[in-house]
Amino acid sequence: MSIIRKLAAAVVVILLAVSSTGAVMAQTKIDPEVAKTLTLKAAALVKEQGVDALRPIFQTSPDWKYADIYVSVIDYKGVWLVYPVRPAGEGKSVFEVKDPDGRLIVQEIIKVAQDKGEGWVEYRWLNPVSSKIEPKATYVKNVPERNVVVYVGVYK
């Protein structure tokens, strides 16, 4: 088991601990540092190997896709290159996609990556595990050598 999966498993175990009322928490939350670590690791691999070589790994490997964690890759025009939640959406432009509050989140993700190199973007999005719109914090990393942005988010 990779160090990242071990870290995520430890977080889940802690979050499943019995609360002071004796009830088990209904939904686990993954530490945002897991998203940041996965993003940076995935971005380094994309820089080295390219998106096409990694697409099947990011889509299916339990080191990269588990619970509500998954690696996404988008180009600077807002075209999804890797989107494990809905692979059929890959190759489609989502540049104009808004969150439920009307924020142009794809444009914001690209802007943060290009302006700062990396950083956090917060918005609301559909959690594929709970099927509910929830607050999400996403860590983004620019990979200028490949003209893409790699990102991983966690639901709050």
Image: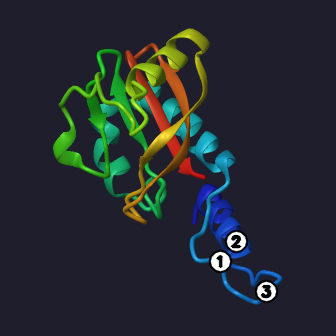
Q: As drawn, which residue projects farthest toward the front? A: 101
Disc 3 element:
loop
Side of 116 where 20 appears, left or right: right
**Mark 3: which amino acid?**
Thr
> Do the residues under discs 1 and 3 have CB atoms within 8 angstroms?
no
Q: Please tell me which residue is depicted at 53% across the width and 30% down the height of the picture.
A: 140
For marks 2 and 3, the one nearer the N-term is 2
**Mark 1: which amino acid?**
Met
* Residue of label 2: 15
> Do the residues under discs 2 and 1 have CB atoms within 8 angstroms?
yes
The percent position of residue 79, horizontal first and vertical second, equals: 26, 25
The percent position of residue 35, horizontal first and vertical second, equals: 59, 45
Q: As drawn, which residue projects farthest toward the top? A: 115
For marks 2 and 1, the one nearer the N-term is 2
* Residue of label 1: 25
| Residue 21: assigned label | 3
**Mark 2: which amino acid?**
Leu
Number of other residues with Cα within 10 Å of mark 1, as a class: few under 14, some 14 to 19, many 20 or more: few
Res 54 quadrant in image: top left
Number of other residues with Cα within 10 Å of mark 2, as a class: few under 14, some 14 to 19, many 20 or more: some
Side of 115 where 127 appears, left or right: left
Q: Nearer the viewer, residue 30 or 7?
A: 30
Disc 2 element:
helix
Count of picture labels = 3
Q: Please tell me which residue is depicted at 35% across the width and 31% down the height of the picture.
A: 98
The percent position of residue 8, horizontal first and vertical second, equals: 63, 62
Q: Nearer the viewer, residue 21 or 4?
A: 21
